[in-house]
Amino acid sequence: MNKFEQLGLNESLLLAIKDLGFENPSEVQEKAIPVLLEQETDLVALAQTGTGKTAAFGFPLIQKIDAEDRSTQALILSPTRELCLQITNEIKQYSKYVKGLHTVAVYGGASITEQAREVKRGAQIIVATPGRMQDMINRGLVNIKNINYCILDEADEMLNMGFYEDIVSILSDTPDEKRTWLFSATMPTEVARIAKRFMHEPAEVTVGSKNSGSKTVSHEFYVVNARDRYEALKRLADANPDIFSVVFCRTKRDTQAVAEKLIEDGYNAAALHGDLSQAQRDGVMKSFRGRQIQMLVATDVAARGIDVDNITHVVNYQLPDEIETYNHRSGRTGRAGKLGTSIVIVTKSELRKISSIERIIQQKFEEKTIPSGMEICEIQLLHLANKIHDTEVDHEIDSYLPAIEEVFQDLSKEELIKRMVSVEFNRFINYYKKKRDLSGEKSERSSSEPRENRAGDPVRYFVNIGARDDFDWMQLKDFLKETLDLGRDDVFKVDVKEGFSFFNTDGEHTDKVMSILNGFDLNGRRINVEISKNDGGSSSRRDHNGRSTGGRRDGGFRGDRNSGGERKSSGGFGPRKEGGFRSDRNSDRSSSRREPGSSQREERVPRRSSEGSSDRPASRSFDAAKTRRPRRS
């Protein structure tokens, strides 16, 4: 007896389940389906990505829909168009034996007129992204005032992407007596707020512990210098010859750059980010599902909704800004009971995030070292040997064998094997024998060497800009990472005072900090940066050549981040929206308020524009216009 029969599903659904080859329900299906079928209740279900949530709400929803009534009876909200289309396709497969039931997908990037026309023809179930759904409501193209069911799928992702106001507005347009089913991987504050406001004594289903990671995914991290991040990615790919992975970057710019480098270096890779057209995204995903692409480099926003079987690895090329997002990344692998691996490439300054993630997912990371060149060559050699051994012979070549055997007649078996393997293997040995070892980096966990003796330790800097230049600590941090082209976690311990500030980077970035920042023109004011010996106390500072510039007492400040005051309402500098910074201040403020000890000579130089990009949603970023980055003289 099929176990789905024991859940109370009707015959038409069981026929579809049989066609799909489903035999045993997943844990979330086993727990949620009976509750939703037997009770008219709201539901909060917490389960990881890839655990079968669509079927968990899809089967009972289809069974409860009146197919003879052509009015809209259910709305399913999902974070992305990919997931919207995926859910729509699955609902159609589940309901294939339910005559008269129609499901319509409503999402951005396609004709809103055509979608409205399909809804008007009769759609008992609408699957929609929040933005497009809100647009259709505003235009009067859809009526959800009488629906019976509303499902929020990947609720934490929708809210993390900045859809809170849209969701509140959409739910406010639905009847109070409807049933709301909320499915989410994690339960952050905003999700709990939605549940409290729009749900009535919901039943709860939890698979595993709240916010915990999947038990089928193992977690590894590798500590490298920031400049070695890409080289580390290549080595990890080479050390896993059968890798079929999603590589996560934080921004669209990094995603495109990493994908292009991988392609140039001979890997089957492609980028997936928000700047691609829908046709381009569809083409990339088709190639990835067909395994023509082994390494899909993606932003978090673009990758949401990816449901591809047998992904072996998730690679965090950069950790996400929001720690909770890690759970969604790692959930792309280890699906349907199969094992997967989540890899994190980190610098020493990012190690604190590993501990934070461990607390959230309730699993431990294993620290590993980047394989050496020779280790990779050995792995590749054995992989090639096994590939040759397991290759099926196409007997179409039989007629050519006499000529081939004649070519090889002067070679022994051993010599022939060596040459066959070398055809493919030589490029690895030639590449790696010239490369240095990357395995020297160790985290605080594994190193007993005193901190002050280890290379790459943090360096503290003094810079002559602060709160009166309209910076708070977050805005200054974003300015520094953009100007220096560093990752978000490469700049830390940012303390802003009235007329000056302190910040840290790893020692490996010191030359870049000193050479790029010294001499930058900030709206007519020349930036001066120097190395501080302590956290804002008296310091003896040095120029970028290491020469002492004397020093002054800094008043013993210890770095209260907010001591410099809040950002002024008149504008000024703020974190980028699409890159760079802006200033609404008058340039005549520049030289009259110089910090003691800074350069007395001011130069006005042209400034260059910055064309950064980010997938960070509007609600998660500050309202800053596209701006220009200062240029050093």
Image (cartoon, rainbow, N blue to C red):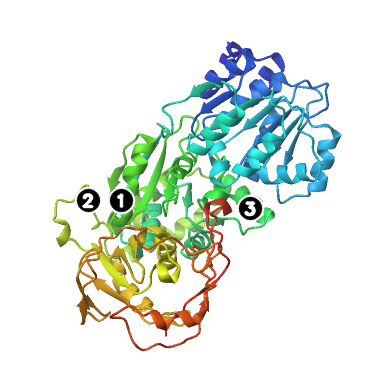
Badge 2 is on which residue? 444
Looking at the image, do the residues carrying marks 3 and 1 touch, with CB atoms under 8 Å apart?
no
Residue at x-position 34% and y-position 87%: 600
User: Which amino acid, mark 2?
Assistant: Glu
216 and 446: which is toward the camera: 446
Of the numbered discs 2 and 1, the one sitting upstream in the chain is: 1
- Residue 398 seen: no
Residue at x-position 47% and y-position 38%: 331
Q: Quadrant of residue 459?
A: bottom left
Of the numbered discs 2 and 3, the one sitting upstream in the chain is: 3
x and y, in percent, of residue 603 in the image: 42, 88
Callout 2: 10 Å neighbours few (<14), some, many (20+)? few
User: Which amino acid, mark 1?
Assistant: Leu
Above or below 150: residue 238 = below
> Is 445 left, or right, of 335 in this rendering?
left
Q: Secondary structure at mark 1?
A: helix
In space, the residues marked 2 and 1 are separated at their CA atoms by: 8 Å
Badge 3 is on which residue? 281
Q: Quadrant of residue 196?
A: top right
x and y, in percent, of residue 40 in the image: 65, 16
Of the numbered discs 3 and 1, the one sitting upstream in the chain is: 3
Tell me the mark number nearer the camera, choosing from 3 and 1.
1
In space, the residues marked 2 and 3 are separated at their CA atoms by: 41 Å
Badge 1 is on which residue? 351
> Is 522 left, or right, of 290 in this rendering?
left
x and y, in percent, of residue 167 in the image: 64, 39
In space, the residues marked 3 and 1 are separated at their CA atoms by: 33 Å
